[in-house]
Amino acid sequence: MMGSFQFPFIFFAFLASVKGVDFSFSHGVGGPGWIGGGGEDVSPARDQLVSWSANTSVYGGPATATTLNGAPIPSLSASQAIGTRGHILLQDYFLIDKLAGFNRERIPERTVHAKGAGAHGHFVVTNDVSHITKAKVFNGIGKITPTFTRFSTVGGELGSSDTVVDPHGFATKFYTEEGNYDLVGNDIEVFNIRDPMLFPDMARSRKRNPKTHLKSQDMWWDFASLRPETTFQALIMFSDIGRAHGYRRMNGSSVHAMKMVNARGEVVFAKLHWRTQQPAPAMTFQEAKDLLGTQPEYFTQDLYDNIEKGNFPSWKLYFQVMTVEQANAYPRNPFDPTRNWRVEDYPLIEVGRLTMDRNPVNFFAEVEQVGFSVANLVPGIEPSPDRILHGRMFGYADAIIYRLGANWPQLPINRPREGLQINSYQRDGAACYGDNGGGAPNYWPNSFGGHQASTGAAQVGFNVDGVVDRFDIPEDEFIEARWFLERDMDAGERQRTVESIADRLKDAREEIRERALRNNFYPIDHEFGEEIRKEVERALRRVENERNRGK
């Protein structure tokens, strides 16, 4: 009798002990991962099939199952066979079609940003920024542009946890009247390398050991300690910024500066920043680790359920502007993505508001098949001299073609907005939809009235000079990290950051730990490095004590 009453009380006490984690979205009983129970707070994600079934009944009950070419299927459970014990027949096309389709259900997952969630929404301009850019999406107070946003984790695979402490992607596709504009960023405003030559190496170091297929802190810390420019991003990632309480409460940034051009041809540079309108305290590192086991898809379910319930999340978009003269006078490379621009020096300028108000109809068709490319720009937004930006402009577009094929822009989620006519000389390729350009000429120049270039879309010219060579010359890698530590962190966040770093660093080999302390953390601030060293030592003692208790 006692046991039957103890379990609920112990379980609820456990939930209450995980401070800061809102297991119910409206403080009801049922929350993410709740199995059974009769709480008032129902999860739309958990009950999705029930809702679909109810709606299907309204429209006349189950429809007839068909093949993809529309033919009715005679049986969904039995293959065509010779008697009750004999062989099946190769002529059973329904069976062969089903098995062949199953073999081809998966497309290559993204090498980075594989695990994700997304939602439709709209962007509304709230401030006049026509003096900064002529991009129509950002001009005209009150203008509404449909959007699709995909959040993601960077290092994990498609089935990994979205609560892991890791950089998170924040990519928004604006379906503008001038074509699709992709704002492809992260929750952390800086990158961890400055030359795209290191991009594959950086990504591999975050993934699995090629022999053991296990995640390895040795790999990441080995890479990071040999490239000190990784330090600032790591510091932010292990701070409260890197432990946002779900996608709805996550900020975002373009990471790169973009060249902005107004209608008069005047140029400035701008970084773009999202600021969530659903602020909440960050999770502790331990809370994030606990959710890896109890609710690994907390971020995804939190986003889905809140949108289904009409609790639409929103973000404000800001520009951070630097003039050409300021860029030329900047003491370091202003286009180095491992550095940020201090807000007190380059204030945020409000642009508009993004609201997400509709979940995808089908996850694969939209979240998996959406393609985001940094190269998808519109007039008024152009590349800056950021070298990582240049590498991503090729790498991301090429990755989409590899995953989805050359005709990926024709997939519904990737098509430009309705009413915007596509007039392209690019033709054919696998899985081509529509009329493929019809009978229009597929070459240029031609004398038959084919499509012509738009002089108004020309990018501004610029002068360059310098010696062509390969440059890997480190500057002061720690000044921005030092400012972040001194100006942006209070004592509580500093301690939480130390604990987060130590929790990961303790699992690396001793010589790699020492190198990370020496190359990454002591140069920021000697006292900060000492704090991390002592916390690592305490963490290692705890591990040893637990190991001894288990013997």
Image (cartoon, grey):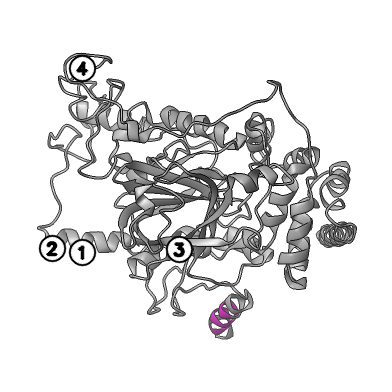
Question: Marks 1 and 4: in contact by CB < 8 Å?
Answer: no
Q: Position of residue 328 (x, y in %)?
A: 66, 42
Q: Is residue 541 left or right of residue 452?
A: right
Pick whichever, 397 or 459, lies toward us.
459
Residue 54 tag number: 1
Q: Quadrant of residue 238?
A: bottom right
Identify the secondary structure beneath mark 3.
Answer: strand
> Callout 3: 10 Å neighbours few (<14), some, many (20+)?
many
Q: CA distance from mark 1 to mark 3?
A: 33 Å
Distance from disc 4 to disc 1, alpha carbons, whole Å, reads 50 Å
Marks 1 and 2 close (CB-CB < 8 Å): yes
Return the residue at label 3.
315
With 243 as the anchor, is 80 left or right in this view? left
Q: Is residue 363 visible?
A: no
Alpha carbons under labels 3 and 2: distance apart = 36 Å
Numbered disc 1: secondary structure: helix
Above or below — where is 257 with respect to 54? above
Q: Position of residue 52 (x, y in %)?
A: 24, 59
Q: Give coordinates of residue 291: x percent, y percent.
A: 58, 62
Q: Earlier in the sequence, mark 3 or mark 2?
A: 2
